[in-house]
Image (cartoon, rainbow, N blue to C red):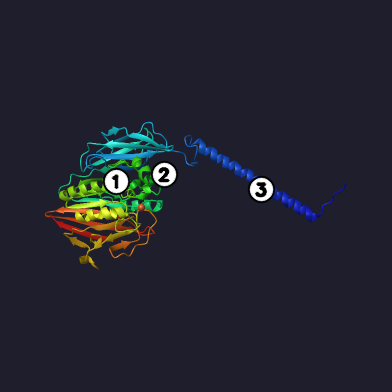
Amino acid sequence: MNVSVSPTRLKKIIAIGFISFLLIFSTIYYITILNETHSKSNSSNDDDSDSIILSPLTLTPKGIRLTFIYNYNDSIVISWYTEKNATEPKLSYSMSADLSSATEITPNSTQLTSSTYIYYAELVNLSPNTTYHYQVRSDNITKREIMNFTTLANRDISNISFLVYGDSRTQRLERRTLVEKIMASFRNNFEFIVHTGDIVEIGTEQNEWNEYFDDTEALTAYKQGVYVEGNHEGGLSTKMYNNLLMYGTDTERYYYFNYGGVGFIILNSNDYTVGDDDQTNWLNQTLIQLSQENTFNFVFLHHPLLHTSRSSDYHQEHWKPLFDKYNVSLILCGHNHHYERSYPMINSSKLDDYDNSEQYNYTNLNDSIYIVTGGAGAPLYSVYNYDFIAEKEEAYHFILVDVKKEIAKMTISLESWGMPNDFGPLYLIDNITITKLT
Ligand SMILES: [Fe+2]
């Protein structure tokens, strides 16, 4: 039987055959590449078979952060993590920059996930107001560069200074860039940091904590930190207290310390659904004591109590009257992702004396000023237009607070510094002083 094929039909057959060949070839090639990627991942990640990690896990110490847990001027906790288990983790520290005559300690360690091992080194019996150099390592080969910190002083007549920021979750480039700018411009202008909460977006995800301390290590490895719990930290199920060994524990998440004539009160504003009377009673007793001991007292909590829809009725009803009664000078909050400073407030109202005032220098002020600082990396919010607001800015930012003791008077100086969206030079948003005669 003769079969004849027309030239046109023959061209079609050849074209279809060629296209089919290309499709089969590209499918085989894709499957081969995919299998190679899987096998590489699994061979470098034997202890984490549930996930695909393209970069190999490492023993390198990462995410180094400082906290104080006992006495701020003679002890410090240095924490870090590795992705693989370090069998010989060590920390060496010395007053010498080259670590000569260093003290070596073995940290406590805990495995938090299949690829996160965390280490806590507690340094005690340190000298106040002294710079120490330190180095952490996983073994004799895998180590980090030498870093340093300065213990806080026994302050009677001199300045104290600290940095406040909050809501650093979500946007890694913004929070990393802000920290770089802080350290480039103000490294020697503050002694410690206070974070007003929402450090990470999902507090139960260990990877978020690792990323946060990776991004901000240029700050957290050199300045000891005080961390307020935000709603994003996740409450009792949080990994916050595994990552931040400090005063509070997962059952006692509020505390205070006095430093240089100032009381620092750290509150947890997350627990209010079933009442919060234990913390409220503690706050009342603490304010009775600290109002006798200090010229100024500051309160730090996550939720902004002047914003009725952004904080709990319980805390507005029970905590604001205590701040009024005991003349708390500054209440520093987060939760709203911008900067905001209120006029001096009492009984939840702006005082008539300050109505439409351009005044930024207050003397013998007994009334409370509420600050919102929630611009360390979370997506920014538009500012509000409530009449209690004296100054506001939609910007990534941080606050520097300096408290100066002089003969017969004591002065708070607060500066808010912003970072433009294009990451240009920092600019001054706000600057106030509060002076009290002593
Ligand atoms: Fe929040």
Q: As drawn, is 367 to the left or to the right of 429?
A: left
Q: Secondary structure at mark 1?
A: strand
Question: Given the image, on which type of amino acid does mark 1 rest?
Answer: Gly
Q: Earlier in the sequence, mark 1 or mark 2?
A: 2
**Residue depicted at 40% across the width and 51% down the height:** 172
Q: Nearer the viewer, mark 3 or mark 1?
A: 1
Task: Give me the C-alpha separation between circle 3 and circle 1.
Answer: 58 Å
Task: Give me the C-alpha separation between circle 1 and circle 2.
Answer: 21 Å
Identify the residue under disc 2. Answer: 205
Q: Are marks 1 and 2 in contact (CB under 8 Å)?
A: no
Identify the residue under disc 1. Answer: 225
User: Which of the 4 image quadrants contains residue 317?
Assistant: bottom left
Horizontal and vertical percent position of residue 209: 38, 44
Q: Residues within 10 Å of mark 1 (few under 14, many from 20)?
A: many
User: Which of the 4 image quadrants contains residue 423?
Assistant: bottom left
Mark 1 lies within 8 Å of ligand 1 (Cβ measured): no
Closer to the camera, 201 or 403? 201
Q: Secondary structure at mark 3?
A: helix
Question: Given the image, on which type of amino acid does mark 2 rest?
Answer: Glu
The quadrant in which the C terminus is found is bottom left
Q: Earlier in the sequence, mark 3 or mark 1?
A: 3
- Using the rendered image of the protein, determine whether residue 239 is visible from the camera's viewpoint: no
Q: Nearer the viewer, mark 1 or mark 2?
A: 2
Identify the residue under disc 3. Answer: 23
